[in-house]
């Protein structure tokens, strides 16, 4: 779907067109779900949170400005990030620090589906700070632009570039020989 | 041989993208969500926002009042002053306006040969602003025609 098409759908959705929002939902659900899952580690919970993200996005759509450079995907990821942070504050078991806990306690692995296929991903992400993890996911996995990532995380674009350099240096040092 | 960083990130990305959700599952979840979506609020253009309209109307009203006050005649101003004074419980205007030529009270009039009031000293201790104060109502007063 081209950016123009997405913009048209967003404008329609802002006017209350649920069908247009449905098209956006089908287009972005997979990405938002992946993002939620990598933070929450549970598929079913990630699906519920993902639905909540779109519900909140629908309610906040009136405040989203199409013409100010902000993209709809950045808007969705921001809503998702805020929701995950809210959840992590409410429930400690959903904390973003879960990565660290999980790595320390290998016996918990059995609780998660297809965990073996993501063990290395989990191990690497566990070695990063919250912000660094967000940057790696959004920039290198979701392939968002620098300005979008900076907008989602709430830092300046220049700061983001510096952080990316540090993250890459950190990851390079952790590569297995 | 040490693996390259790019290859490492690609490997991680592949793990990140594992377990895709089927389209039918997404469609199903949309049907559930569609029922929960409330009716959208109408998008109100910024200029039509009631706060801005209210602020604009308030500014226009203040400007109009200021215009009326500044351009109105002395008689109307006098009435306004009287109304303000009576509302504030301040004594009659004629007793407080030594520079008003229309005032008839001789008690407040200064003799032509008397010394002028010292600078920064109140002309009348009983004026509305008190000793050493500034009488706001004097702004409205017009000097007598020469």
Image: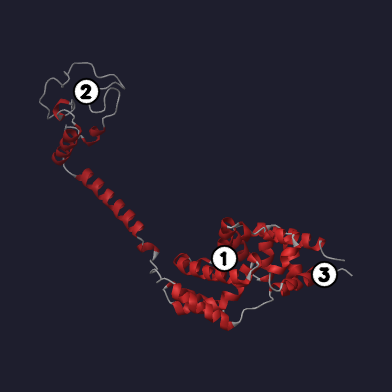
* Residue, disc 3: B4
Task: Give x and y (percent) for residue A167.
Answer: 74, 60
- From the image, state whether disc 3 or disc 2 is nearer to you: 3
Task: Give x and y (percent) for residue A121.
Answer: 74, 68
Give the crowd class for mark 3: few <14, some 14-19, many >=20 residues within 10 Å: few
Q: Secondary structure at mark 3?
A: loop
Q: State which quadrant residue A134 falls in.
A: bottom right
Separation of marks 3 and 2 at Cα, in angstroms? 91 Å
The mark tally for this picture is 3
Which residue is situated farthest in the right direction here? B1
Q: State which quadrant residue B8 falls in.
A: bottom right
* Residue, disc 1: A80
The mark that comes first in sequence, 3 or 2, is 3
Residue A38 visible here: yes
Is B78 located above or below residue A47 in the figure?
above
Which residue is situated farthest in the top direction here? B114
């Amino acid at each position: 779907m081209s950016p123009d098409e997405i913009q048209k759908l967003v404008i329609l959705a802002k006017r209350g067109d649920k069908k247009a929002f449905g098209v956006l939902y089908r287009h972005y659900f997979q990405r938002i779900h992946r993002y939620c899952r990598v933070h929450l580690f549970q598929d079913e919970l990630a699906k519920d949170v993902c639905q909540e993200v779109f519900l909140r996005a629908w309610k906040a759509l009136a405040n989203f400005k199409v013409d100010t450079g902000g993209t709809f995907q950045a808007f969705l990821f921001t809503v998702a990030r805020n929701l995950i942070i809210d959840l992590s504050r409410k429930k400690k078991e959903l904390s973003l620090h879960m990565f660290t806990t999980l790595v320390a306690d290998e016996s918990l692995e059995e609780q998660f589906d297809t965990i073996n296929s993501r063990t290395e991903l989990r191990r690497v992400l566990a070695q990063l700070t919250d912000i660094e993890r967000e940057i790696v996911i959004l920039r290198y996995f979701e392939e968002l632009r620098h300005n979008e990532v900076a907008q989602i995380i709430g830092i300046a674009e220049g700061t983001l570039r510096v952080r990316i350099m540090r993250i890459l240096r950190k990851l390079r040092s952790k590569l297995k020989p | 041989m040490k693996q390259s960083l790019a290859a490492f990130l690609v490997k991680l990305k592949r793990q990140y993208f594992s377990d895709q959700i089927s389209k039918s599952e997404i469609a199903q979840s949309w049907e559930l969500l569609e029922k929960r979506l409330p009716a959208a609020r109408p998008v109100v253009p910024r200029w039509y926002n009631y706060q801005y309209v209210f602020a604009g109307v308030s500014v226009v009203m203040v400007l109009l009042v200021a215009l009326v006050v500044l351009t109105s005649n002395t008689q109307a101003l006098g009435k306004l002053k009287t109304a303000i004074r009576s509302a504030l419980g301040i004594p009659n205007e004629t007793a407080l306006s030594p520079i008003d030529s229309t005032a008839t009270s001789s008690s407040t009039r200064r003799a032509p040969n008397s010394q002028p009031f010292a600078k920064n000293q109140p002309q009348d201790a009983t004026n509305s602003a008190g000793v050493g104060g500034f009488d706001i109502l004097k702004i409205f007063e017009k000097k007598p025609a020469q």
